[in-house]
Amino acid sequence: MKLISTLASAGITGFESPAAEYKQLGLSLDELLIAHPSATFIAQASGSSMQNIGIFDGDILIVDRHVTVVDQDVIVANYNGGFVCKIIDTKRRLLLSANEDNQAVIIHEYDQFTIEGVVVSSIRCHRPPHLLTKCRR
Protein backbone atom coordinates (compact mmCIF):
# COMPACT_ATOMS: atom_id res chain seq x y z
CA MET A 1 0.00 0.00 0.00
CA LYS A 2 1.30 3.47 -0.81
CA LEU A 3 0.75 6.20 1.74
CA ILE A 4 0.56 9.86 0.79
CA SER A 5 2.74 11.52 3.41
CA THR A 6 1.30 15.03 3.05
CA LEU A 7 -1.65 15.80 5.30
CA ALA A 8 -4.64 17.22 3.46
CA SER A 9 -6.65 19.81 5.35
CA ALA A 10 -10.27 20.15 4.32
CA GLY A 11 -11.12 23.61 3.06
CA ILE A 12 -7.53 24.76 2.61
CA THR A 13 -6.29 25.17 -0.94
CA GLY A 14 -2.81 25.54 -2.30
CA PHE A 15 -1.05 22.85 -0.26
CA GLU A 16 1.78 20.89 -1.81
CA SER A 17 0.74 18.12 -4.16
CA PRO A 18 0.21 14.88 -2.19
CA ALA A 19 1.58 12.97 -5.16
CA ALA A 20 4.98 14.64 -4.75
CA GLU A 21 6.20 12.08 -2.22
CA TYR A 22 5.10 8.52 -1.44
CA LYS A 23 6.13 6.13 1.29
CA GLN A 24 5.86 2.41 0.69
CA LEU A 25 4.19 0.56 3.55
CA GLY A 26 4.09 -3.18 4.07
CA LEU A 27 0.58 -2.85 5.46
CA SER A 28 -2.88 -3.90 4.38
CA LEU A 29 -6.21 -2.59 5.61
CA ASP A 30 -6.93 -6.08 6.93
CA GLU A 31 -3.81 -5.90 9.10
CA LEU A 32 -4.65 -2.38 10.23
CA LEU A 33 -8.30 -2.99 11.14
CA ILE A 34 -8.57 -6.68 12.05
CA ALA A 35 -6.59 -7.98 15.02
CA HIS A 36 -8.35 -11.36 15.26
CA PRO A 37 -9.35 -12.49 11.74
CA SER A 38 -11.00 -15.73 12.82
CA ALA A 39 -13.13 -13.89 15.39
CA THR A 40 -14.03 -10.81 13.36
CA PHE A 41 -17.03 -10.06 11.19
CA ILE A 42 -18.20 -7.05 9.24
CA ALA A 43 -21.67 -5.53 9.62
CA GLN A 44 -23.40 -2.53 8.14
CA ALA A 45 -24.95 0.10 10.42
CA SER A 46 -28.56 1.06 9.92
CA GLY A 47 -30.32 4.04 11.45
CA SER A 48 -29.24 7.13 13.36
CA SER A 49 -29.07 5.94 16.97
CA MET A 50 -25.25 5.97 17.09
CA GLN A 51 -24.55 9.12 15.09
CA ASN A 52 -23.24 11.20 18.01
CA ILE A 53 -20.22 8.90 18.33
CA GLY A 54 -19.60 8.89 14.59
CA ILE A 55 -21.46 5.78 13.42
CA PHE A 56 -23.91 6.72 10.68
CA ASP A 57 -26.46 4.87 8.57
CA GLY A 58 -24.62 2.72 6.04
CA ASP A 59 -21.25 2.74 7.82
CA ILE A 60 -19.29 -0.49 7.86
CA LEU A 61 -18.58 -1.89 11.33
CA ILE A 62 -15.61 -4.10 12.19
CA VAL A 63 -16.84 -6.33 15.02
CA ASP A 64 -14.43 -8.45 17.07
CA ARG A 65 -15.80 -11.41 19.06
CA HIS A 66 -12.42 -12.05 20.70
CA VAL A 67 -12.24 -8.72 22.54
CA THR A 68 -13.47 -8.74 26.14
CA VAL A 69 -16.44 -6.44 26.60
CA VAL A 70 -15.94 -3.60 29.06
CA ASP A 71 -18.38 -1.01 30.37
CA GLN A 72 -19.29 1.64 27.74
CA ASP A 73 -18.02 -0.40 24.77
CA VAL A 74 -19.88 -0.10 21.48
CA ILE A 75 -21.23 -3.57 20.80
CA VAL A 76 -23.32 -5.52 18.35
CA ALA A 77 -25.85 -7.68 20.18
CA ASN A 78 -28.79 -9.93 19.50
CA TYR A 79 -31.59 -8.33 21.50
CA ASN A 80 -34.89 -10.23 21.40
CA GLY A 81 -34.21 -11.57 17.93
CA GLY A 82 -32.90 -8.37 16.34
CA PHE A 83 -29.35 -7.19 15.88
CA VAL A 84 -28.53 -3.84 17.47
CA CYS A 85 -25.45 -1.65 17.70
CA LYS A 86 -25.43 0.13 21.07
CA ILE A 87 -23.22 1.26 23.92
CA ILE A 88 -23.33 -1.30 26.73
CA ASP A 89 -23.71 -0.09 30.31
CA THR A 90 -22.67 -3.25 32.12
CA LYS A 91 -23.18 -1.78 35.60
CA ARG A 92 -26.85 -0.85 35.06
CA ARG A 93 -27.62 -3.50 32.38
CA LEU A 94 -28.59 -0.91 29.79
CA LEU A 95 -28.25 -0.51 26.04
CA LEU A 96 -27.51 3.13 25.30
CA SER A 97 -27.89 5.05 22.07
CA ALA A 98 -25.58 7.86 21.04
CA ASN A 99 -28.50 10.00 19.95
CA GLU A 100 -30.57 11.99 22.42
CA ASP A 101 -33.74 11.08 20.47
CA ASN A 102 -33.43 7.45 21.67
CA GLN A 103 -33.98 6.28 25.24
CA ALA A 104 -31.88 3.71 27.06
CA VAL A 105 -33.14 0.12 26.93
CA ILE A 106 -33.09 -2.02 30.06
CA ILE A 107 -31.83 -5.57 29.59
CA HIS A 108 -34.26 -7.67 31.64
CA GLU A 109 -33.66 -11.25 32.79
CA TYR A 110 -36.44 -12.45 30.47
CA ASP A 111 -34.95 -10.75 27.38
CA GLN A 112 -33.12 -12.79 24.80
CA PHE A 113 -29.74 -11.05 24.86
CA THR A 114 -26.31 -12.09 23.60
CA ILE A 115 -23.36 -9.89 22.80
CA GLU A 116 -22.07 -10.79 19.34
CA GLY A 117 -18.91 -8.68 19.56
CA VAL A 118 -17.28 -5.32 20.20
CA VAL A 119 -17.21 -2.70 17.46
CA VAL A 120 -13.50 -1.95 17.16
CA SER A 121 -13.67 0.25 14.05
CA SER A 122 -16.10 1.82 11.67
CA ILE A 123 -15.63 2.87 8.07
CA ARG A 124 -17.60 5.52 6.22
CA CYS A 125 -17.80 5.12 2.47
CA HIS A 126 -18.48 8.27 0.51
CA ARG A 127 -19.67 6.18 -2.41
CA PRO A 128 -21.63 2.99 -1.85
CA PRO A 129 -19.22 0.02 -1.87
CA HIS A 130 -20.08 -2.21 -4.82
CA LEU A 131 -19.96 -5.31 -2.60
CA LEU A 132 -22.61 -3.92 -0.26
CA THR A 133 -24.99 -2.20 -2.69
CA LYS A 134 -27.01 -5.41 -3.02
CA CYS A 135 -27.39 -5.56 0.78
CA ARG A 136 -28.91 -2.08 1.20
CA ARG A 137 -32.59 -1.55 1.70
Image (cartoon, rainbow, N blue to C red):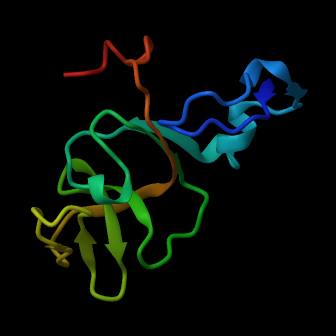
Q: At 61% from the left edge and 58% from the top edge, which residue is drawn? A: 66
Image side of residue 40 versus residue 107, left or right: right
- List x then y, in percent, for residue 61: 45, 42
Q: Can you give x and y, in whole percent of width and height, for residue 11 in the image?
A: 47, 36
Q: In which quarter of the image is residue 115?
A: bottom left
| Rendered view: 82 above or below 112 | above
30 sits left or right of 26 in the view: left
Q: Residue furthest bottom?
A: 91
In front: 39, or 28? 28
Residue 65 at x, y = what percent? 54, 54
Residue 29: x and y, percent? 69, 33
Up-down relation of residue 99 to residue 64 (above or below): below
Task: Indicate left or right for 59 with 80 as reference.
Answer: right
In this rendering, the answer to whether 106 lies above or below 119 is: below
- Residue displayed at 71% across by 42% down: 32
Q: Give 18 or 25, whichever is nearer the viewer.
A: 18
Of the 4 image quadrants, the one containing the C terminus is top left
Tell me how many marks there are: 0
Which residue does the image show at 89% across and 31% down from the upper left?
Answer: 26
Left or right: 128, with 100 as reference point: right
Quarter residue 43 falls in: top left
Residue at point 17%, 68% (across, down): 111
Q: In which quarter of the image is the N terminus?
A: top right
